[in-house]
Structure formats: C-alpha cells, structure tokens
Image: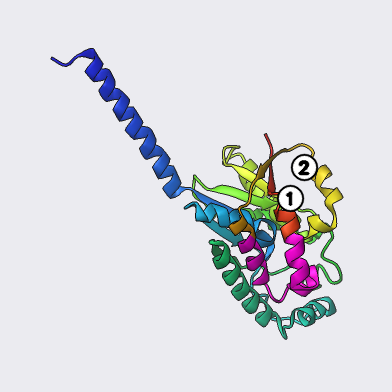
Amino acid sequence: MVSAYSVQHLLFKINLWFNHTKVTLIGVFMRWIYISPHLDDAVLSVGGLIHDQARDGNRVEIWTLVCGFPPEAELTPFAQLLHFQWGFASAEETVRMRRAEDERAASVVGAQAVHFDIPDCIYRRGPDGEPLYPMDIFVPPHPAEADLPAKMTAILRDRLQPDDVLFCPLGIGGHADHLLVRQAVEGLVLSEDEGLNRPLWYYADVPYVLNHPEALEPSTRLMTAERREVSSGGLAAWVQGIAAYQSQISTLFENPLKMKEAMEDYGGKGILLWRFE
C-alpha cells in the first residue's frame, strides 16, 4: 500500500523535475536580441554586456536594421563626404566593408550578426527622387517616411520567437535612423496583437550619450533603471569589438586611444538599462 507521504514525495519530485526542465527549455529557446540601427550601434553601446551574456551561455544576436545596399543613384555631397572620411569609394563598398567590420565585432563579443536590407538614411530618397537627408542626419524622421517604422516592425515580427528578449536604443542624439528604429520596436511590443508581455529594455546610444549626458535624464524620466555590471573581460572585449569598426573610429572618437579611454571610463561603471514598468 502506497502511503500518503510517498505520494506527496513523488509529486514533489515530479514538480521539481518539471520546474527544472521548464527553466532549461527557456534557456534553450530564449534569445537576447539587440536591435541596432547601424553597423556598430549595439557593440558601441552595450558590447561589454553582450560579451558577458554570451560567456554565460546565452544566445545573443545583434540585428542591424539599417544596413542595406542602396539602389544605384547619384550620391549626395554629404554621403560622398562621409565615404571619404571612412575611406570608401562607393556606397556598395561602404556597406560591404562595414558589414564585414560588424561580423568581426560581433564575433569578438560573442554574438551572431544579422543584417537587414533597409538602406542608411544618407542614401534614402522620397517618392520624387529627392534625398530625404541631404545635409543632416540628426533631425526628426522625414514625413515621407511615416510608414517606415511599421515596415520595420513587420520585418522584426517575422523573425522573432515568443521567448526573445529585446533591447533597443533610446535615441539619444536624435539620429533619424535611431528614432525610427525605436518607433519600430515599440510598435512591435506595444501593438494589440503582441500586448505588453514581451520584455523590452532600452540602452543609451554611444557615443552620443558620452557627448550629451544631459540628454539621458529627460529621455528616461518615466522609466525604471537597472545597472548591469560588466566584467573585466567584458570591458576588454567591448573595446576590442569597437576597434573592429576601423572605418568609424576617427569619426566617432578621433583615434583608438581616445576610444579606449572613453569606453573604459564609461563601461567601468557598468551599464544602465531602462524599461517601462
């Protein structure tokens, strides 16, 4: 005859096994997805955290939305100037080489790089063929692109899995592409069919937060902050990952030494993430 104690003990062991299996399966299927506007933003902003998450056995991916090959068209003087600063001769070479830099950087921090096909704002044109951002990129999104966030949202929804945790930029600095990407991610998480159950964290945009730290408080006023520590190995990988973006260093930090100093000062305090309650 089976005693009540034996039944209770058996049920306890079954429950323990179930909970352990559930946690294990969540770990298998969960991905940490960092939504990056351009081919450097995620590693610049949270490369140390990405490294530590990957080191701990998590599946980490960096999805860069705005890195597509643009259609052949005459480049604006502004785009030509940027190409010259970066050391590239054409839009095709720029995208191809910057994607290769991103692959190397993602490998350094232990993430998988995923590239999408929307061209950078310096290449995008309106229905009339005129460039939408001919002289400046730190401006509100152009009215002609009012439907672009919804298109981005659809692209993301097609690839996301139920257990994915999302990270997206706050949009500090006011770069048009960063603002569009944030709108797209929020449209995904806050839409009626998705509800509010998918975890969404925000990260501060580096280097813009370094140049304009005063923009952080108004950008996060209604959010809850959480500080994540970065290991010494994570900080070293962060710096090494950023260094992989060789074409961008002079534009963003002047030189590798200043980049290293800036990131060790910033990342040595850990990383702040934000979310809405």
Image x and y of residue 258, in percent? 78, 68
Residue in the image at 83% along x and 61% along y: 138
Amino acid carrying mark 2 in the image: Thr
Amino acid carrying mark 1 in the image: Leu
Residue in the image at 59% along x and 58% along y: 233
Image x and y of residue 77, in percent? 84, 80
Q: Which quarter of the rendering shows the C terminus?
A: top right
Q: Is residue 62 visible?
A: yes
The residue stretch that appears in magenta = 236-263
Name above or below for residue 65 compared with residue 202. Answer: below
Image x and y of residue 167, in percent? 63, 50
Q: Are marks 2 and 1 in contact (CB under 8 Å)?
A: yes
Front residue of 273 and 99: 273
Q: Is residue 29 left or right of residue 269?
A: left
Residue assigned mark 1: 170
> Residue 220 — which label?
2
Q: Is residue 217 left or right of residue 55?
A: right
Please rate how many residues cluster around mark 2, counting C-alpha atoms within 10 Å: few if below 14, some from 14 to 19, many from 20: some
Task: Name the image quarter holding residue 266.
Answer: bottom right
Task: Name the image quarter holding residue 99.
Answer: bottom right
Whether the magenta-drawn stretch holds residue 258 is answered as yes
Front residue of 57 and 155: 57
Q: Is residue 42 left or right of residue 51?
A: right
| Mark-to-mark CA distance, 2 and 1 | 8 Å
